[in-house]
Amino acid sequence: RWIDMARARGHEVMLELPMEPFDPEADDTGPQTLLAAAEAQQNVQRLENLLSRGAGYFGVTNYQGARFAASAQASA
């Protein structure tokens, strides 16, 4: 609903995807966090779950995520 309200006022919306930070104990990003060491299928399932939580957004961006982004395997 909030995405629809933002779009009705001329705004675009991006979803923030929780990605594993270097210090996950200090920066809890939640249970659906994309993890650098996770199997690709687990991250895909989490990603699909996150993307299904809304509609009308035009893209995604990271929330935290330095460890995840630094991993070539995870980013692939």
Image (cartoon, rainbow, N blue to C red):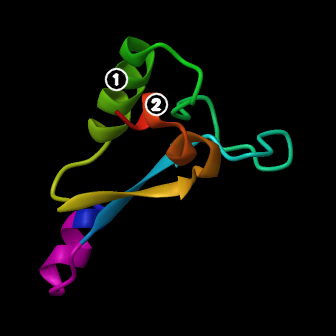
Left or right: 69 as drawn, with respect to 1: right
Residue 9 picture location, percent across and down: 18, 86
Q: Position of residue 48 (x, y in %)?
A: 29, 29
Is tag 2's residue or tag 1's residue first in the polypeptide sequence? 1
Q: Image quarter for residue 23?
A: top right
Residue at the location (37% across, 13% down)? 41
Q: In the current view of this chain or complex, which residue is farthest to the front?
A: 72
Q: Quadrant where the C terminus lies?
A: top left
Judge the density around disc 2: few (<14), some (14-19), many (≥20) Cα neighbours within 10 Å: some
Spatial distance from mark 2 to mark 1, Cα to Cα?
A: 10 Å
41 within the magenta span: no
* Residue 73 position in % (x across, y down): 45, 28
Left or right of 59? Residue 31 is right
Residue at the (37%, 37%) spot, across then down: 50
* Residue hosting label 2: 74
Q: Is residue 71 left or right of residue 23?
A: left
What crowding class fits label 1: few (fewer than 14 Cα within 10 Å), some (14-19), or many (20 or more)?
few
Q: Amino acid at mark 1?
A: Val
Residue position for label 1: 44
| SS state under label 2 | helix
Residue in the foreground of this view, choosing between 33 and 65: 65
Q: Nearer the viewer, residue 66 or 61?
A: 66
Which span is picked out in magenta? 4-12
Relative depth, front residue between 66 and 50:
66
Q: Residue at x 21, y 82 (%)?
A: 11
Q: Amino acid at mark 2?
A: Ala
